[in-house]
Every structure is written in C-alpha cells, then in structure tokens.
Amino acid sequence: MAPTATDRHGPPAAGRWRPLAGETLTPSGVPSATVAAVSGLTAATAGPEEPLVLARGLVKRFGDFEAVRGIDVEVRRGEAFGFLGPNGAGKTSTMRMIAAVSTVTGGTLRVLGMDPATDGPAIRGRLGVCPQDDTLDSELTVRENLLVYGRFFGLSRAECARRADELLGFVQLTDKVNARVEELSGGLKRRLTIARSLVNEPELLMLDEPTTGLDPQARHLVWDRLFRLKQRGTTLLLTTHYMDEAEQLCDRLVVIDDGVIVAEGSPATLIREHSTREVCELRFEVDDHEQVAAKVSDLAERVEVLPDRVLLYADNGEAVAQAVHERGLSPRGTLVRRSSLEDVFLRLTGRSLVE
Amino acid sequence: MTSTDLRILPRRAGATPAWPLVERNVVVYRRDWVIFVTGFLEPLLYLLSIGVGIEQLVGEFVLPDGRAVSYTEFVAPAMLAASAMNGALFDTTFGVFFKLRYQKVYDGVLATPLRPRDVAMGELAFALMRASLYAVAFVVVMAALGLVSSWWALLAAPAAVLIGFAFGGAGMALTTWMRSWQDFDFITLAILPMFLFSATFFPLERYPGAMQWVVQATPLYQGVVLCRGLSTGALGWDMCVAVAYLLALGSLGLVVASRRFGQLLLR
Amino acid sequence: MAGDVTSRTTKRSPGRRPGGRQGRPPGPLLRQVDHWAVRWRRTWRGSAITNFALPVLYLLAMGVGLGSYVDDGGASRALGGVAYLDFLAPGLLATTVFQNAVGASTWPVMGAIKWDKTYHAMLATPLRVRDILLGTLAYIAARLALTAAVFLMVLVAFGVAASAWSVLALPAAVLVGMAHSTPIVAYAAWLDRETGFMLLYRLGVVPMFLFSGAFFPVAQLPDPLQWLAQLMPLYHGVELVRGLVLGAPEAWPDLVHVAYLVVWLIVGGWFADRLLARRLGGR
Ligand SMILES: Nc1ncnc2c1ncn2[C@@H]1O[C@H](COP(=O)(O)OP(=O)(O)OP(=O)(O)O)[C@@H](O)[C@H]1O
Ligand SMILES: [Mg+2]
C-alpha cells in the first residue's frame, strides 16, 4: 500500500484539533452542542445526561473463575475511554458485557440508559463493535461483508450500498472491494472490521485491541480514522496493550489488572501521579541486573529491575546518568527519556508490557 | 457490482429480524449457483436408476392392500421424502457447524440486533427455501414420468418442505452439541437406517410385528406416509398424525437450537 | 497439531524406529508412520462403526428386504442365475470401498493443503512431495483394506462369500478404491475451492455409484449409456469383485478389469504427483 497523505501526518496527538480533510462520512446523530463541549484532554462533563456506559461493581464469572471482579466504569458521551491491562486482565470480558453479548454475573450495568439483560437488541443496534478476533464473513467479499452486515441492522439495501462505499473509502479499501476476505492481510482485515463496525453509524464504538498485529503505517492510519470519528462526536471505548496508543487516543483510561481497576485518570494525570518526570534506562553486559541495581539504587527515587535493563526514576534523568558513570560503571547502553504510561503500568502491575 | 445486489429477493427487512441472514446465504449461494442447480440432480438420478434398473427386476409390485403398482411409483414418494430430509440436514448440520465453530459467522451476527432465535430461524428458513425449490422440481418430474395418480400430489411438495422443517430443526439442535467433524458419524448412523428401513424400498408389512412399531416411530417413516398418501391419492388419518409429528419435531428442534445458540454464543 | 506430530517424527532417534536399523535413518515412508498413526487413532472408532453398520444395514434392506421381491419376480436369469442378495453384496463391497476412497481423497487432502496445512509442515522436514503423496496414498489404502475386510466378514456371515477365492476380493477392492483415489487426489491438489467436490459428487460419484452395475446389470441400460457405464472404472471394479466373491478367478475378463484399474491408478498417480508438487511449490 502506498503511503497516503494521512499516514505522513503521523498519529493525531490527543487534544490537538485538526481540520477534517477528505471528510466523507456523515456525522452520527449527535447534537453538535455535545460535540463542541468535548475538548482537549479534559473530557466534557456529561451534564444532566446519563453516561453512555455506567457500571457499578461489575462482575463476570466463568464457572468458578472470576475474570472481572467488581469494576466501576463511567463512559461519557463524546470521550475516548480506554481499558489498559496485561493479558488476561479481563478487558475483553468487560467489553463483551457492555456490548450485550455476554451475560452479567454480578453488579449493575447500564448501556445507553438500557439494561443489556433485557434490551440487548436495542443496545446492539446503536453500538459498533470491533472484536478482538475479526469475525468477518469469509464466504463474502469485502463489499458484501458491509452490505450484509448493514442489513442485520435493518437498513435498506440502498442505504447499505451507500454506506458501504463511503466506509470503504474511509478505511482506504476501495481497491479491494471485490476481493474475498480470505485474500486480505491481517491489517486489511482489521480495517474492514472497523469499517463494518461503523455501518450502523453507532453512537458508541467499541474496539478491542484495534491495532494489535498491524504494522506501524497501518496503525497510524487506524489512529487517524479513530481520531476523526471522535471529532465527529462518536464516543470511543477501546482496549489496548499499547501505551503509545492509549496516550494518543484516550481522554481517560483505567488500568485493569486481574479483574480489578488499579488506577484511573487521563494519561497525563496517571503519569504525574504514578511516575517521575524522567527515566534513565541502563543496559549492562551482565546476566543479572539485580547486582548492578544495588550499586545505583540510591541515585533515584525508585528503581525497577527488568531482565534486560535497569530503570532509574528521577526528575532529572541526565544527572542520574552522569552519576552512574562517575561511579565507574559503564553500561552498554544509556537512555534518558520522559516517563510514559509504560512506567505507570510497571509501577501498578509489576509487569512490563511488550511494545 | 450487480453480483452483490440483493434485488432478486423481496424487500422484507424489518418484517422479521431473521430475514437478513437468509439474504446472506443467498449472496453466498449465488456465487455457487452450479452447486445449487446440480442439487436437483441427485434425487433424479436415484429415481432413474430405480426406474431403469430395479423396476425391471422386481416386475409387478403388489401392495399389501392388493393393488398392483409399478415399483418406481412406490419408491418415488419415498425418495422425495428422503431427499427433503437429506437436503435440510446438509444445510443445518454441516453448514451450521461450519459457521458456528470455524467461520464464527454467528459471533458477528449476534453483535447486531439479531438474537439467537433469529439465527436459528434464518438458517432454517433458508434451508427450507432451497428444499422447496427441489421439492417442486421433483414433483414435476414425478408427474412427467407418470408416477402420480392424483391431484393430491400437488400437496406432496409442501409435505416435503414440512419434512425438511422437522429434520432441519432437529439436526440444527443436535449440531449445537457437536464437538468435531468426527461426531457427524453419529448423524450418518442415525440417517442411514432411516433411509433404508422407513418403508422406503418395501412396505411396512414386510417387518415382523415389533419392528413395525420401531419403524413407525421414526420421523422419516411419517414423512414417507405423508408423501406416498398424497402422490397415490390414498389418503388416511395416519397422515394427520404424520403432520402433527413432523411439526412438533421441527418446532422442538427450533426452540432447543435457539436456546443452545444463546448458551454457546452469549456466554 | 500437525507441526507437533511431524517434529516428533523427525526428532526420534532412528534406532527406535520400526524397520529402521541402528544408525541408519528410516526411509521417508516409515518416517511418516507416526503421523498417520495419530490420525488413524483419532478417527478409527467412528469409521469402525460405520464400516460395520453400513454393509449390514444395506444388505438387510436391499439384499434381504428388496431382494425377496426381486427373487419373487423371477429375475434370477437377468442376474446371471443368482439371488439378488448374492448379486448385490459384492457390488456393494466395491461401491463402498469406492465411496470411502473418494471421501478420503477429497476434503482431507484439501484440508492438509489449505486449512491445517499439514503438508506444508511436513515439507519443512526432509520429506519430499512424492514421499508425502505416497504416505497419503498408503494411509488411504490401509483404511480401505480395513473397510473391505470388515465388509468381507459381513458377506461371510450373510452366506454370500462361500468360496476361499473370496479372500482375493480384499486386494481387488483396495485396487478399485485406489484406482479412484489417485485421480481424485490429483483433482483435490488442483482444486482451489471445495465447491468442486460437490460437483464431483453430483456429476461423478453418485451416477457412478448408481449405474456401475452394483444394483442392476448394466445390460439393462439403453445402448449409449451402457457403453458409458462400461468406460467407468467402477464398472470394472464391480465386475471383478463380484466374480471373485461368487466364484473362482478367470483370466478373461478378470485380467482386463485389473489392467484397466491399474491404468487409472498409475495415470492418476502421475497427475497427483505433478499437481501436488505444483500446489505445494516444491518437489
Ligand atoms: N469463555 C471463557 N471461559 C472461561 N474463562 C474465560 C473465558 N473467557 C475469558 N476467560 C478467562 O477470563 C480471564 C480474562 O480474559 P479476557 O479475555 O477478558 O482478558 P483480556 O484482558 O481481554 O486479555 P488479552 O489481553 O489477552 O485479550 C482470562 O483468565 C481468561 O482465561
Ligand atoms: Mg482481550
């Protein structure tokens, strides 16, 4: 795929507004006042309106195993909300309950003001869902997937055809219109799944790991498209393992570990509250970084030892690096950088994430 | 793009939520129209081989009530019933299993306003639409070959669809318990004796007393009774029993399949 | 799963292999034994039941049930002087093995190429395409032999196979199956989508099954159709097996039947080798 104009823009920075170039999709039926109220990093206050998703003490059990153990979430109209967590944290389980395709074991859950247990079809009619594993119909072509899916929402054939063509343009699949799904690469399938989840012009778009397995270029394209949707007033609810993705896209996020929420806030707040301003990363030619860590632990506010490196948390990373060298230690590599969500994550869950 | 248009179907979206699923199958089958068309062939070939081959060997075939008919005339309605059974089962067992376990079509479908029972009804409806086309064609061929002796034979086509409903519903329900393709051996093992012994190739009276009860309990026997009664015009009260039996079986299957889809897909 | 099995096969020390002497690696066919054995173990139960149930049910319904009407009708002259059960049973042996051969050479082969990619996993080892083909065919032949053996025992129980020559019907039936298996494996290796198998069944397998002379003598067919039927390898298979089950082998026409079947086997095998190599992109 040739690089496109949007790809070269790089990821849209959260909170930075850009003009809508090449806009083709009609905005979903959200009052423009609501859209205007959403701005920057601080999400709009929902006002008198009920949150789109409201969970209190939400529990999901599979047999004896408790995958989700009492989660409180509130997703407001117009914001981009993220679930961040390691494998098996319970992200998908939570998403499926919200999408009304998985029964709630305990607690209360209201989606779009309705109860998923009784109003499943009505809720699903107003949601767009991009599941973790693509559930595209492999017996249909790319375009047929959108046509047929639109019909499931009760749209007329003409309307389905119109939206299918628009959406294929939106995710840049126009040259694959008549390809069979089997022939698509993983990234193209993902884009088609995202297009399919938009066919009913949903108020709330749910994306379970939208960019896992995509190459950097494809990720940026997806990010850009999601950002545009958000600008048009679509509420986004997404899960991710990627810290940069969460920082780029999410106004607010929760970190889930082992079925419970361990932190909540905007990316910037989380970094401020749970980490230092800078980090100094050291790599040594030794098998055991623990020994090295003991020699430098007094230099930083906090030390984190990973199998392949030592992280020193401090407000001035350069000063720490300097001090390390002065002690006669010569790391194979030294990197000073700003704190990221990754560091927050490490702090909160004691686990590093693969980027 | 014309190939993907759905215009051959009536505009029914909204009338029943299951309808779009039928449309989905139509889109798929349109590409494989050869398969669709050759589906007519199989029962016809069976009929021909019986007409050309077995009928000559059997000679005059005397029914238990003393009437003499040609052997093909005797077997043809049973072939109609059996092929309705086979056709419906093919779509609702292999077809549904593939979409349920491998293709994950229904995971996508249930993320929309459709409910598990819409999935069950949509799949069965499509299987029956296909079955009815084949049934009509078969009855026409029977009439053309002089194998029917009454105007009641017109009702043999809907009767075949009813048979498809009964087996389709039951087969779909059983499919929800299947774990692998290997398990389908059990379906074969249930179907084959029914095909051979449901008064298809020789009359019920041939069996010893107790066996007659067993044979009469099978759904295919009931279907054969229905089709044979209509094609020969020898109507009887047992045909009402057959209709009730088949309706009950199909409905039960549909209800069970709907519930099982819910359990499997909306965990 | 597939990769699993293959890697286990190649990693085992050669000395412990059946047939492989200490220090000398086993031949490419023997190296696949574990793979196919695992496959067999996974499926034998279901197929054993069908292998046994199918002949019993068919012989009861068509041979005994329908047979009584045929014999009453005095058709024994058209059948060459035997009862309908005796006429039908050997024919069914041939057609059943034929049908099993088709079943084993279609979807499983496409699956190994396309869906679970077993063949690709095997090709990543020192095995060559031809080894894999021979392994597949040997596996199919072994399964057909089991089917035929069980069927023959049922024939003995029904009193159809009375002479000792009937034992020869076992290899004959396997030959019938394999004469169809090789061209169909070739077709499966060439085919892009599985819908082609449906066509094969409807336009090939079903007509052959019905008109190959298993259920009634092909002499009853009108002339051009009769010639067509006699071109089908299955017709020769039915005649061959019937001759062996009901009496002693005769050089004429049995050798002609065998020769015709062998031609199909070899030509089919040649195509299978070429097409599979092309499909898997190697030798
Ligand atoms: N259908 C199920 N039956 C039993 N256990 C399940 C089921 N679905 C999920 N689980 C378990 O629940 C836990 C949470 O799973 P979930 O899929 O929600 O995690 P996740 O956060 O989405 O992980 P990942 O990042 O790997 O997608 C896991 O331990 C998983 O094994
Ligand atoms: Mg997940």
Image (cartoon, rainbow, N blue to C red):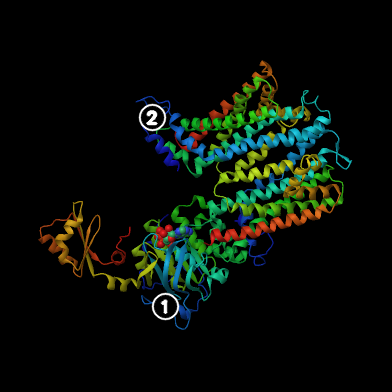
Q: Amino acid at mark 1?
A: Val
Please give the name of the residue rendered at 58% of the width and 27% of the height, measured from the top-left corner.
Answer: C265
Please give the name of the residue rendered at 41% of the width and 67% of the height, measured from the top-left corner.
Answer: A69
Residue A245 as seen in the image, left or right of residue B189: left
Q: Quadrant of the N terminus of chain B?
A: bottom right
C-alpha span from label 2 to label 1: 72 Å
Query: Measured along the vertical axis of the image, is residue B78 above or below residue A214?
Result: above
Note whether ligand 1 is within 8 Å of mark 2.
no
Please give the name of the residue rendered at 47% of the width and 56% of the height, measured from the top-left corner.
Answer: A189
Q: Could you tell me which secondary element the residue under label 2 belongs to?
A: helix
Residue C133 visible somewhere in the drawing: yes
User: How many numbered marks appear?
Assistant: 2
The residue wearing badge 1 is A38
> Callout 1: residue from which chain?
A
The residue wearing badge 2 is C16
Tell which tag, 2 or 1, sits nearer the viewer. Answer: 2
Residue A230 as seen in the image, left or right of residue B264: left
Note whether ligand 2 is within 8 Å of mark 1.
no
Q: Position of residue B261 (x, y in %)?
A: 58, 59
Query: Measured along the vertical axis of the image, is residue A343 above or below residue C51?
Result: below
Query: Measured along the vertical axis of the image, is residue A218 above or below residue B223?
Result: below
Q: Position of residue A172 (x, y in %)?
A: 47, 60
Q: Could you tell me which secondary element the residue under label 1 belongs to?
A: loop
Residue C143 as seen in the image, left or right of residue A92: right
> Callout 2: residue from which chain?
C
Residue A115 as seen in the image, left or right of residue B224: left
Answer with the quarter of the image where residue A121 lies: bottom right
Q: Amino acid at mark 2?
A: Arg
